[in-house]
Amino acid sequence: MGGRIAVVADRIGWEERQLMKAAPDLGLRVEWVNDESLCLGHPDAQSIKDYDAVLIRSRSYTRGGLLATLAESSKIPTLNSAAAIHACENKLVLRTVLRDAGVPVPDFRLVVSRRDFAKALEQLPMPLVMKPVFGGMGKRVTLLRHPDTAHSVYDYVEDLGHAFEQACLVEPFLGGGSVRCFVVGRELVAAAEFESGGADWRNNAALGNRNRAAAHDPDILKIVNDVVNELGSGIYGIDLFRTPAGYLVNEVNHAPAFRAVASATGVDVPSVIGLYVQELLR
Amino acid sequence: MGGRIAVVADRIGWEERQLMKAAPDLGLRVEWVNDESLCLGHPDAQSIKDYDAVLIRSRSYTRGGLLATLAESSKIPTLNSAAAIHACENKLVLRTVLRDAGVPVPDFRLVVSRRDFAKALEQLPMPLVMKPVFGGMGKRVTLLRHPDTAHSVYDYVEDLGHAFEQACLVEPFLGGGSVRCFVVGRELVAAAEFESGGADWRNNAALGNRNRAAAHDPDILKIVNDVVNELGSGIYGIDLFRTPAGYLVNEVNHAPAFRAVASATGVDVPSVIGLYVQELLR
Amino acid sequence: MGGRIAVVADRIGWEERQLMKAAPDLGLRVEWVNDESLCLGHPDAQSIKDYDAVLIRSRSYTRGGLLATLAESSKIPTLNSAAAIHACENKLVLRTVLRDAGVPVPDFRLVVSRRDFAKALEQLPMPLVMKPVFGGMGKRVTLLRHPDTAHSVYDYVEDLGHAFEQACLVEPFLGGGSVRCFVVGRELVAAAEFESGGADWRNNAALGNRNRAAAHDPDILKIVNDVVNELGSGIYGIDLFRTPAGYLVNEVNHAPAFRAVASATGVDVPSVIGLYVQELLR
Amino acid sequence: MGGRIAVVADRIGWEERQLMKAAPDLGLRVEWVNDESLCLGHPDAQSIKDYDAVLIRSRSYTRGGLLATLAESSKIPTLNSAAAIHACENKLVLRTVLRDAGVPVPDFRLVVSRRDFAKALEQLPMPLVMKPVFGGMGKRVTLLRHPDTAHSVYDYVEDLGHAFEQACLVEPFLGGGSVRCFVVGRELVAAAEFESGGADWRNNAALGNRNRAAAHDPDILKIVNDVVNELGSGIYGIDLFRTPAGYLVNEVNHAPAFRAVASATGVDVPSVIGLYVQELLR
C-alpha cells in the first residue's frame, strides 16, 4: 500500500530532500508543492486533491496555519494539525496553553506598546530577552543587557513593526544550555543538548556526550508527554531551557529542522517521519 | 450585588461611553483600561487582577486575541472568549469553521503570493473583492472590477505588506445588501438591513423599514444560532450578505460597534450587554 | 589604454551581461560588484578603490543615490552622477526640476495623506494614475477608473506604506502611447514607440515601424536635450507620453534596462555605453 | 510692511506657538497649515498661494523636502530651501557634502544589507552607534556595545525595515558631550552644551555654565560658518560631538526644536526667527 504525500514548503531544503529520499523504501511518494501556488479555498481545491496527505513544511511563520486550516477543511490528512500549528505559531498562546496545563515555561510579559515595554522593564530584571510573538528561525530574538539602550532597540519595533509584528514577549534571560527534543507522533525520537557560545549570543554547539542521557531523562520525557497531550500527536521540535529549577519549554516548532539533531544523535529522522505518515494513511 | 468591569480598549469611543452610562443602574462599575498598558503575562497580572470581568473592545485587529488569552489564563471572566476572538480575527479560520459546520459562507481563495493571486483571477470571475485575512473596519477591502488593473493593485500587497499582512482573501463580489446582526449571549438582539451606495463602494445606508422583519427572519435566526454554536456565547456583530440563494455569513466582529444598529432599531444595546455581563458574574 | 569598471548591481542581469561581453573589444574590464557588500563610507573604501569607474546599475530604487554619493566622494568617476540619480529616484523632484526648466511634464498632485488624496480626487478628473514618488519597474503604478473604489485602494498606501512609501503622485491618465528614449552622454542613441495593450494596463508592445522616425523627431530631440541640460551627461532612459498637445516627460530612469529598446531598434547599446565610458576615462 | 507666513507642520507644537506669539510685534501673521492637506503639485497651488513665505516645520522626516520642492516651484519664498532640507534629511548626503568641503564629521559606514553590516563590524571597533540614514528625533539611534548581540539587533532592520528604512549608518560611539548650535540666517544665535546621562543613553542634560563660552568658541564658529556655506542661509540646529580631536558635525536639523536651547541660553529664538523672515520679505 502506497501513498502520495505533498510536502508544502517554500523550497526543497535539506530536510525535504531527506524525506524524498527515504520515501520510496516506505512505499511513499513525496512531492514538493510550492506553498505560494496552492490557491486554496474551494473545498475541492485542485492543487491538493490528489494527495493522500499534506505535510506542512513552510519556513514562513505566517502560512502554515492558514494552509493547514484549508487542507483539513478539504478532508486531506494534514500534518501538523491546523490547531497545533496555530498554537505553535503564536508564542504567547503556546506558553499560556502549556502553563495552564501545568507545563513549566519561562515567565514573560506581552508587550504591544512602548508603555507595556516600560512596565516590563520595571517588573523584570536585566538581562532580558525580547522576541516577536510571531516569528521563526531565531530572528529578532535579541538580548537586552543594559537598561539604557533597551528603549532605543524597542524603537525598531515601534517604528518599523506593523500590526502583529509589534507584539513581543519580554522574558528573563535564563542562560544555561538548551535541549532540542524531536517528537514524531507521541514519541521523543531524538534529543540533543546544546551549549550557547560563539560569535552570536544565539549560537549553539551540540554536546554529543549528553545526548543519550537526554533522550532518557524522565523529566524531559514527562514534559514531552505533557506537550503532546496539549497539541496532539504530530511532528514537533520542542526547545527546552535547562535551568537550576529544572527544564522549561521555550518554544515548539511545528515544522522543525532536523539536520543538527539527526547529526548529533545519529537517529534516522526522515525514516521515522515516513513510518509515522505511513501509519496515518492506514 | 455589583461588579467591576474592565473595558479594555485603545480609547473611550461612543460605544464604551454608553456602556459606562448604562452600568450604574445595573449595579456595575465599568472602567476603561488602556490596551497599551496592561503588561499581561504574569498569572496574577496587577493591571487586571481587581476586576470581576474583562470586556475586550480593542479596535486594533491584533491585540484582542492576545489579551483575552492572558486574561483568561489569569482566571478573570473574559468577553469574548479568547477562542472566539482568535476565530473572528482570522477571516480565513472563521469562514472555514463556519463552512465545515454547514453555515453558508461566500466562496473564496486564500492568496499568499502573486502566484495565488493570478490563479484566483483565473478561477473566479470579475468583479472580485480582495480583503486582508487580518484586518478591521473595512480597511483594505477593495473591489476589483477590471482584470487589467488587478495586478497593479496587488503590487501594494506584495511590495508593502509584511508577514501576515500579505495574506488576502479573494472572493466574488456579491452586490445586494447586507444585514448586521447584533448578538448578546446567544440571542439576536437587533438586526438592521443596509443597502450599499454613495461615494465609496463600501458605504451603507440603513433601511429602517426592514429592520423589524430582519430580526424575526427564520433564515437569519438559524444562521445566528449556528454561528453561536460554533463560537460560543458572547457579544458579536454578524455581517450577512443577502444573495438570491439566501444569506451568507461575511464576517463576525468580536468587538462590534453598535451605534448604527442601535439607531436603526431603537434597541438599548448597552443595557442588554450590561445585563448579560451581570448574569455572567452570578 | 584600458580601464577596470565596477558594475554595481544587485545581480548580473541581461544588461550587465551584455556590458561585460562588449567590454574587451573596447579595452575595458567590466566586473560585477554586489551592491550589498560595498560597505562604503571611508574615503578610501577598499571595495571600490581599485576601479577606474563605477557604473551604478542597482535595480533597487533606494541604493543608487546613496552609493553614487559615496563613490564620488571617494573620487572615482561615477555614472550616473549622484545628483542625477537623486533627481531620477525622486519622481517629484524630477518633475519639478524639469517643469521649472520649461520641459513639458504631466500635471500631478503630491499626496502624503488621506486628505491630500481626497483633494487630488476633487481637483483632477478620473481616470487617474496613482504611483509612488519613490519606486521602480512600474510597481504600484495603478489606474484609478472609479471614484467609488479609489479610497479602498488608497487604504493600502495608508495602512501598509511606511515613511517615504506613503508619498504618492496622482496624475491624469493620458492614454495614448509612449516613447522610450535611450540616452548616452548627451545623445539620443535609440528611441522606440510603444502602444499600451494586453492583459495588464501597463503592458506595452513596441511599434517597430515608427522607431526610426522617433529617433529623428525634432520635438523629441529638443526634450531630450533639455532633460540632459538639467541632469548632466549620463546614461538615461527617458519615458515620454505622446499626447495631442505634444510629448510630456513621464520619468527618467537612471539605470535603464535596454533589452526592449535594443531589440526594437537594432542599436548596439552596450557598445555605445562602453565607448562613452572609455571616453570618460581619458 | 507685513507678511503672512504659513508654518507648514503636522501640528502646532511649542515652537510653532512661540513663533505665532512673537509674530504680531514684528508685523507678521503666522498661521499653521497642516502638512497633510496641502495637495501641492499645480504651480498655482491654492493652499499656499496667498502666503508671502512658507516655513517648513514638519516633524515628519519624509515630507519636508517634498513640500519645499513644490513650494519653491510655486515661487513662494521657502525656509529652509528644498536643497538644504534634502541634504539634512539624508544623513549620508549631509556627511559627505560636509566632509568633501573639509568640515570634520565622524567616520561612518553605509549599511544597506547584512553583508555591509558584517563588514562594518569588522572595520570599526565596538562600541558603535547604528542609526537610520533617514529619520529624526533620535529614533532608532542605538548603541551596540557587544558584538554577540549586534546581529540580533540588525534583524529588526532586515526583517521590518522597508526600502529606505533599511539604509543605516554605523559609526564609532564618541561618548563625550555635545553642543547644539542654533543658526538663523548665517548667524549662530545660541549654543548649549549637553552632557549625556540618565536612564537612556541618548539623554542629555544642559550644562548652563558653559553655554556662553560655546557661543563664542572660534572652533565652533568656524564649523557653523562652513556648514552654512554648504547649505546656504537658513534656520538650522547643528549638533556637534565634542571629541579630544575637536568638534565633529553629527547632524544638521532643518526644522529644529528650540525649547531646550532657548531655555539653556535665555535667547529669544522666536523673535530672532521672526526678524529673519521679515528681512527675507523685504
Image: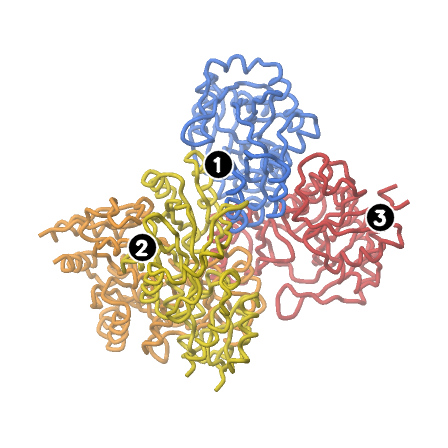
Chain colours: A orange, B yellow, C blue, D red
The N terminus of chain D is located in which quarter? Answer: top right
As drawn, D55 above or below C90: below
> In the image, which disc is placed on residue C9?
1
- The amino acid at mark 3 is Tyr
Foreground: C20 or A222?
A222
Mark 2 or mark 1: which is in front? Answer: 2
The C terminus of chain D is located in which quarter? Answer: top right
Task: Determine the residue located farthest toward the right in the rendered image.
Answer: D1
* Distance Cα–Cα, label 2 vs label 1: 52 Å
- The amino acid at mark 1 is Ala
* Distance Cα–Cα, label 2 vs label 3: 69 Å
> In the image, which disc is placed on residue D35?
none
- Residues tagged 3 and 1 counted as in contact (Cβ below 8 A): no
Q: Check chain identity for marks 3 and 1: say if they share one.
A: no
- Crowding at dot 1, Cα within 10 Å, few <14 / some 14-19 / many 20+, comes out as many
- The amino acid at mark 2 is Pro
Query: Could you say which quadrant of the image residue C129 lies in?
Result: top right
Question: Which chain does tag 2 point to?
Answer: B
Mark 3 or mark 1: which is in front? Answer: 3
**Mark 3 lies on residue:** D276
Query: Could you say which quadrant of the image residue C246 lies in?
Result: top right
- In the shown orientation, is residue C32 left or right of residue D44? left
